[in-house]
Amino acid sequence: MIRKRLRKQSIFIQLFAMGLILMLVLLAAFIITSSQRKLSLRENTLNFNEQHIVQIENKMEEYYGRMTQIATVTAYSPTIYTYFFQDSVERVTFTEDVNTVFSNTILLENNISGIYVFDQDMELIASMGHGEQGAENMELIQVRKEQQEYSNIFYFSNSNMPYYAIYFPVFDLNSQVYGQQIGMCVFIMETDKLMEILQEEQATSHTQLYILDGENQVLAQQGGKDADEINADWMRTTKDYQVTCRELPVGGWKLVSRIPQKELFGEEDGSILYLGTYALALGLLLCMLLFCYRRLALPIREMEDFVGKVLEDPKARIQVHRRDEIGTVEASLNQMLDSLVEKNLQIRKAREKAYQMEAAEKQLQILAYRNQINPHFLYNTLDCIRGMALYHEEDEIAEITLALSKLFRFAVKGGNVVRVEEELNYIQEYAHIIHHRFRERIKVQTEAEEGVLTKSVIKFLLQPLIENAVFHGLEQKIEGGFVRASISMTGEHTIQCIVEDNGCGMEPEEVEELRERIKSGENQRGVGMANIYQRLKLFYGERASFRIESVPGEGTKVTIVLPDQVEEGATAYV
């Protein structure tokens, strides 16, 4: 009995010793992995921050390139370039054209607050925007530069908003002497664009990002308290902050990233909880060692062998013999294999679709790059034609050319949503062309309630309908006629648009056939109606209605009812 008791005690001691050894091993493993985890988290956070810094640098390079392109297009446009070589009398006649160029430039970049143009003696010859009525900060702005530079931050006396200047020298392109400077353009910039560049670029929730000028004044910041200037201590790593400083491609500017040291390691790792869990798991393991070996380890080994075999035969499935959790795992394994086959098929289809979408996106990018060139050429050509018409006192040609220029500017203007007032202005410019073309035989009329002018609708909502009415309904009538576009509110949040004419009209069979073609996108009377119908479905869905009515010999009427709120992407326009 004593020997048996000693044997039992000896086995218990052996099991206890084994458990103690396992506990010590697990504890050492926990300490090592916890330390490695902290180092890994710190390295990952720093790498993540480095990626964000590179993204900010890329955004700044892109912004620098865009502003260089805008400055080049503005300074070397025919109007501005010619303006440098004119005397004061000649410049008076070109003032309106210069202001037009300035307005177009500001439309390209809404952060441009003002534009100054100086001649080769650094005398101001043209300006537009903030500060043009006074001489404040003119000493800062009126500095001759022989290459493109970005200034430090400054303020106008009547505003607390920070600004910076972009100096862009202009050279004589026809001079035989290289680098013959004829003047300089200065762009006064707001800092909102710089704030946008820093948005969503924080590596951690409390990371502080700053863009500084040459005097360490804050141009833009994200996170932390508002500051006008950063001292040298803030740009050094301390026990509280990990600091990274980078020179930006803009001369003299810097990017500063400050990450709290405690956030480098992520959230608290819960070492005590993990340690208790490890101890509990070890105790359960010692108590259930034999049971687990027979009821768990052996079945798991069988599943492991099956997994090795299933790689050779993907259609193979494990036989389920038990109704407990192991049996559930075996059944789940079979389901997982079935799902894996289905997922692989879905992934293959998704990759094919992604490839097609990527190819289509690249084609759109190519078209976008190509279309960036054409508008400036056509603007200048139309302005040239108008100028020649005015010179030869051909007022009608000048007027129709001006209307066409405004139509084209509206057409290429970015965005799919405009105000009703802008759409009506576009129709009125189109009406000028129609009146001149048909010698007022065909009249285009517009009506709109006062309260609907500020509402937003999709672009080109009515003009294609008016064009259809003119060329398919009224052009065939010898005596001409009219087409009327009216917009009104029919409810608190509902807009009604009506385009009607007194043209030749259509037979009922033609109207029904036209409705079917519009719904299918195959409109033989012109792409206008089909285009509008498809865009209404795209932007409004079932909330918009499109109705066509026509009486032979009396005319045609198109009625569109839509909500006064339109969504473009994730942005809602009211």
Image (cartoon, grey):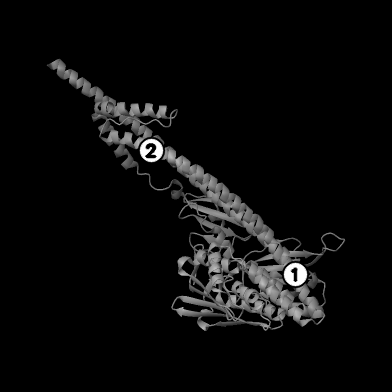
Q: N-terminal of the two: label 2 or label 1?
A: 2
- The kind of residue tagged 2 is Met
Q: Is residue 103 above or below residue 14?
A: below
CA neighbours of label 2 inside 10 A, class few (<14), some (14 to 19), many (20+):
some
Question: Residue 228 appears in which quarter of the rendering?
Answer: bottom right
Image position, residue 82 (x, y; %): 80, 71
Q: Quadrant of the N terminus?
A: top left
Between 494 and 438, the residue placed more toward the observer is 438
Relative horizontal placement of residue 376, taking residue 161 as reference (left or right): right
Q: Which residue lies at the image location 38% right of the left edge and 36% below the top edge?
A: 31
Image position, residue 17 (x, y; %): 27, 25
Relative horizontal placement of residue 558, taking residue 482 as reference (left or right): left
Task: Please give the residue where the numbered disc 2 appears in the rendered image.
Answer: 336
Q: Is residue 326 above or below residue 491?
A: above
Between 442 and 242, the residue placed more toward the observer is 442
Q: Is residue 550 above or below residue 145?
A: below
Q: Is residue 99 visible?
A: yes
Q: Is residue 137 visible?
A: no
Q: Is residue 152 above or below residue 389?
A: above
- The kind of residue tagged 1 is Asn
Q: How many marks?
A: 2
Task: Please give the residue where the numbered disc 1 appears in the rendered image.
Answer: 380
Q: Which residue lies at the image location 46% right of the left edge and 79% below the top edge?
A: 490
Image position, residue 276 (x, y; %): 29, 39
Question: From this viewpoint, which residue is outermost toward the left?
Answer: 1
